[in-house]
Amino acid sequence: MQFSDILLKWFHQHGRKDLPWQHPVSPYRVWISEIMLQQTQVITVIPYFQRFIARFPDVTALANARLDDVLHLWTGLGYYARARNLHRAAQIILQEYSGHLPDSAVDLISLPGIGRSTAGAILAISLGKPAAILDGNVKRALTRLHAIAGWPGEKAVEKQLWLLAERHTPATNFADYTQAIMDFGATVCTRSKPHCCSCPFQSECAAYSQGQPTAYPTSKSRGRLPIRQVRLLILKNVHGEILLEKRPPTGIWGGLWSLPECTMTEDIEEFCQRVYACDITHMLQKPNFRHTFSHFHLDITPIQMTATLNPSKIMDSATTVWYNRTETDARGFPAPVKQLLESLLEEPIT
Ligand code: SF4
């Protein structure tokens, strides 16, 4: 039996068929789910997907939304460039493709945030078109099945994996096969404890026969992550409102609403007076905590302060706002900032 036949047989017995983006299947819904599933597990994605689709049921709704609303629904999922790219891509699809996702890989890949594997998944799953995929789950399974050494992010290794992915893709039944290979990687050939005992490929898996399945895929060799430090200022005015700033559109936490930042060495009182024309009347250092990005740790020291304002300084603007709990308009927050605000306000921010 061919690889795809064995996999499809396994899929019909054990594959996932009740995921929210499978009912109904459409290019838009597969696109949103594929972007959310990058770097994120299914169990985490499901509620985010449901809220997102309820608010933005189609390309037009997403394209016409405020970026703040999109980022608000993304808060906690991380990798916010994904949400910014979705929003931008929806606007392009609305303008250039009358609101319908293009049905060719070349056109899909030209959109922000859509790579070759995501384009393949959209085409195969929603349109039943012939296309291979190579997401993280598939890379892991293929490196083990074929004992492919080398970090899959390296061009030469990735090229080899794409050839294998294409070779294994059958001549028909693309939608089921694509879902099957993703499910197989996510539920059988898992990252740290692959279920080799129940794997339909055990007898032909090269990594298993070597007795070391988890030696594949090869990790990227990198040293310890660098550590950066920052103080986040929880600046309250006499009404109990908290000062928020909108971050620049690109970079870390791009486009999200955050707390003012100050370096570890700056004089905070002088900083607040100079930048915000605030006099500090009370200051309290809260417990430090660490937030880890893919390429560095950020050690955060929150400083809570009460400020009296210079009335000549108008601070509400497109990028600065005094935030209070009764506000109803949605904003996207970085996870650690949301966590801090919730701890201050006691009740969750919705
Ligand atoms: Fe993965 Fe184990 Fe199956 Fe090999 S035998 S493909 S390592 S689950």
Image: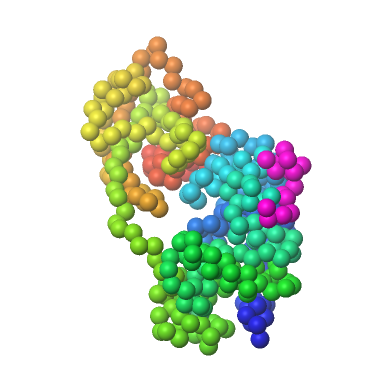
Who's the residue at 67% across and 39% down the image?
A: 91
Taking the image as shown, residue 16 lies to the left or right of residue 95, namely left
Viewport quadrant of the N terminus: bottom right
The residue sitting at 51% across, 78% down in the picture is 145
Instruction: Using the rendered view, name the quadrant where residue 282 is placed.
Output: top left
- Describe residue 100's horizontal placement relative to residue 263 as left or right: right
Image position of 247 with respect to 159: above or below: above
Nearer to the camera, 52 or 86: 86
x then y, percent, for residue 9: 66, 81
As rendered, which of 40 and 153 lies closer to the eye?
A: 153
> Seen in the image, is 72 located left or right of residue 59?
left
Q: Is residue 150 visible?
A: yes
The x and y percentages for residue 25 are: 72, 59
Q: Which residues are magenta?
A: 92-106
Q: Is residue 13 visible?
A: no
Q: Position of residue 196 (x, y in %)?
A: 49, 82
Q: Is residue 74 in the magenta section? A: no
Spot the residue most to the top: 312
| Residue drawn at 64 percent across, 66 percent down | 132
Out of 256 and 128, give the one closest to the viewer. Answer: 128
Q: Residue at x 60, y 51 (%)?
A: 114
Q: Residue furthest right?
A: 98
At which x and y percent is residue 310?
36, 14
Labels in figure, total? 0
Question: Can you name the residue that lies furthest to the front here?
Answer: 156
Name the residue furthest bottom: 203
